[in-house]
Image (cartoon, rainbow, N blue to C red):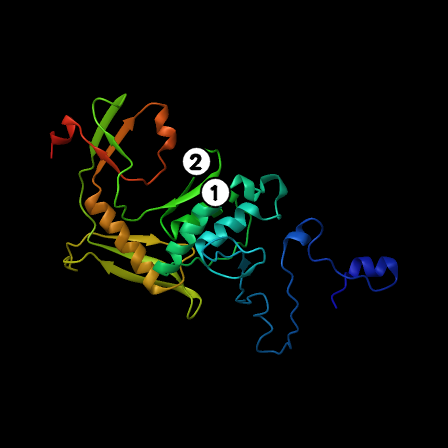
Amino acid sequence: EIYNPDKSATANNFVDEIILDTPERAKSTLIGLRIKTTDSNAGKLNKLNIVTNGIARTWDGTEWSATKSKTANPAAWLLEVLTTSSHPPSRCADSELDLDSFGELYEYCEDEGLTVNFVITEGDTKENILKKICGTCFAAMYRNYAGKIATTFDFTRENAIAVFNTQNVISFKNVKEIGNITDGIRVSYLQADAWDRDSSLVMRPGAIRDGNAIIRDMSIEGVTNYDQAVYIARRIMAQELYRQKNVSVKVGQEGAFYAPLEKVLVQHPSLKIGL
């Protein structure tokens, strides 16, 4: 038992210490530890490392579970952050979400072996937390045409949903980024084997690691294994190489039906101008 010395002295009796007061206590996970102190560990008690497991709803291919279980799937944690009761004012009901789109992301992460693992130790906005989770699986969130929050993710799509040309766009802007292509990325992440920061240099296929190589550093949150860190670094270098043109198109009200990261075809004379 831990007792509050000041309150115990005033009450002339032992009064339990409340580590966190209401309402923070209701939102926190309390862990009780019994530690035998010795001369060798007396100065280390303020540096404890604890491995935790989070539970969230999971997807069975048809619907989301009613109960929660251990999972590291990014889609499950996006849903958990959105629907958690820890912050009632920002809590979303299932009716406000496109649950099927979260299920599609769940299946994609399972197939690709993508996970998310991090602990929130200090205050942060829900928006930032959601962005961190999306960053581990190249996903994005948006409101669909029905007004519900949906998810989408970056993968190869076979069919285009629209064709943009001079006949059906209001404005068109085409910009190509000209710069040196990165030869490699030194990615830093938390390695789960030792739960310590680790870094790996991922080179672009065909690039030579020498004094002239262009190497940049990148830190990833939520990734705790080498394979996923390499996967993200290679995806970023591929995007840098193959997505050098930024095309901005303004359309009419039909644009409400175009979801982010969908595939479209573009026909415009300006695409032939320049490099």
| Front residue (pair 272, 125) | 272
Find numbered disc 1 in the image and state the secondary structure of the residue it sits on.
loop
Image: 71 above or below 133: below
The residue drawn where x is 38% and y is 44% is: 152
Q: Residue pushed farthest right?
A: 12
Find numbered disc 2 in the image and state the secondary structure of the residue it sits on.
loop
Three-letter code for the amino acid on which mark 2 is drawn: Asn
Q: Is residue 219 left or right of residue 35?
A: left
* Pointer 2 with pointer 1, Cβ within 8 A: yes
Residue position for label 2: 144
Image quadrant holding the C terminus, namely top left
Label 2 neighbour load within 10 Å: few <14, some 14-19, many 20+: some
Three-letter code for the amino acid on which mark 1 is drawn: Asp
Number of callouts? 2
Image: 8 above or below 91: below
Q: Is residue 89 left or right of residue 12?
A: left
Residue position for label 1: 98
| Residue 175 coordinates in the image, percent (x, y) | 21, 32
The residue drawn where x is 25% and y is 59% is: 202
Kindly report the distance in space between the C-alpha atoms of the residues bearing marks 2 and 1. 8 Å
The residue drawn where x is 53% and y is 48% is: 81
Q: Is residue 20 left or right of residue 83?
A: right
